[in-house]
Image (cartoon, rainbow, N blue to C red):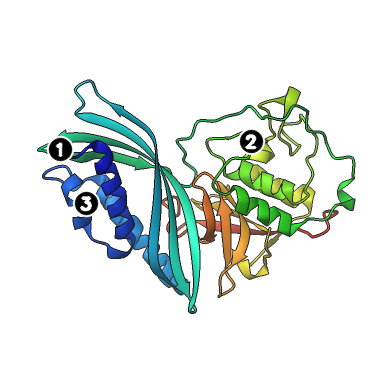
Amino acid sequence: MKSCLEAVRQYFDARTQNWLAKDERLFGEMMPAGERPQWLARTVHQAERKRRAYLAQGKRLARAHTKIDILEMQASKDKMTVRVTVLETICWAYIEAHTPAVECRRIVHRQVWVYSESAWRLQTAEETSDGQSFLQEDVGPRLAEDLRTPKRPMRNLVYDRVRATRYADVWWDGFNPRYPKLADDCTNFISQCIHAGGVPMTKIGDKQNGWWVGNGKSKGSWSYTWTTSNALYHYVLREVGGKRVPSPSDLKMGDLIFYDWEGTGTFHHSTIITDFDDAGYPLVNAHTDPSYHRPFTYYDSRAWTEQTRYAFVHLPDNLSG
């Protein structure tokens, strides 16, 4: 009898092949008998949406590679049902203007497997998406000292785009232990990136008006602007000297893009530009679903809708504004 662990690995092998093959038969043995489960429809739709997004940007998907880490397996008393949590790291290799490039992402999966008719069947499956996480928050920062407001005034500071983007590339798939780990981590991560680039914390302890994250005596505290996309957007424009520009072509490495998924005027997601493709369009890094050099449009995201609107924000080189 095949073990549940073998069935899980077979599922992710099939999922990897499906990005290019678009073939439901890859999942045949693991489907519940007599029905087309929701997870299968979603998986096939995701692969098709990914291919269409690449084609719209002049990219050709060449191959996909997946690595999985089993985070948890819990079996029922009769061993016939198993709940599994898996961390998937997936990289897509694509060709653009005869040049190879790579995009990567990390996705957490929760699955329920049931042994039925001599095979393990995937009963239910859910996965993280942009703005939705299964991660447990770790709100205890690990610095012994408090973070203090920098003594240098804002006007003497320069935004170091190289340091900001380097930080984004180093920590795209992990959590810096100097900072709290949040379930919805996208804006916490972007705040860390631009802070690494030289944007100073301000008004420590003022949740409403400052931009900061606490350590030491302020353990587990942060401002709304540090962790909330819409608040960071307004703070960057008001206090940092950021300018909203009309086109992604007006942006540079280290600039920011904010996402309003529903077109309501409130931003729900934040990313930082870490590269550009051959056509000059931004590639971004982000958290919640950790993403590396992802096309900025997010067309393949389950959060994206026809109403999605973007705010392209250029940060000044001189932080005096």
Q: Is residue 229 visible?
A: no
The crowd level at tag 2 (other Cα within 10 Å; few <14, some 14-19, many 20+) is few
**Mark 1 belongs to which amino acid?**
Met
Name the residue: 75% across, 27% down. 144
Q: Position of residue 119 (x, y in %)?
A: 15, 40
Q: Residue furthest top?
A: 77
Q: CA distance from mark 2 to mark 1?
A: 42 Å
Task: Assign the C terminus to one quadrant of the image.
Answer: bottom right
Left or right, 88 with respect to 291, comes to left
Q: CA distance from mark 1 to mark 3?
A: 18 Å
**Mark 3 belongs to which amino acid?**
Phe
* SS at mark 3 in the image: helix
Name the residue: 16% across, 42% down. 32
Left or right, 123 with respect to 294, comes to left
**Mark 2 belongs to which amino acid?**
Pro
Task: Assign the N terminus to one quadrant of the image.
Answer: top left
Label ID, residue 38: none
Say if mark 2 contacts mark 1, CB within 8 Å.
Answer: no
Q: Is 233 rendered above or below residue 122?
A: below
Name the residue: 63% across, 35% down. 177
Q: Is 310 rendered above or below residue 206?
A: below
Task: Check disc 2 and report the residue beneath it.
Answer: 177
- Marks 1 and 3, the one that precedes in the sequence: 1
Task: Check disc 3 and report the residue beneath it.
Answer: 27
- Marks 3 and 2, the one that precedes in the sequence: 3
Q: Nearer the viewer, residue 164 or 297?
A: 164
Q: Position of residue 52 (x, y in %)?
A: 38, 67
Q: Is residue 207 visible?
A: yes
Q: Position of residue 25 (x, y in %)?
A: 18, 57
Name the residue: 49% across, 50% down. 262
Task: Check disc 1 and report the residue beneath it.
Answer: 1
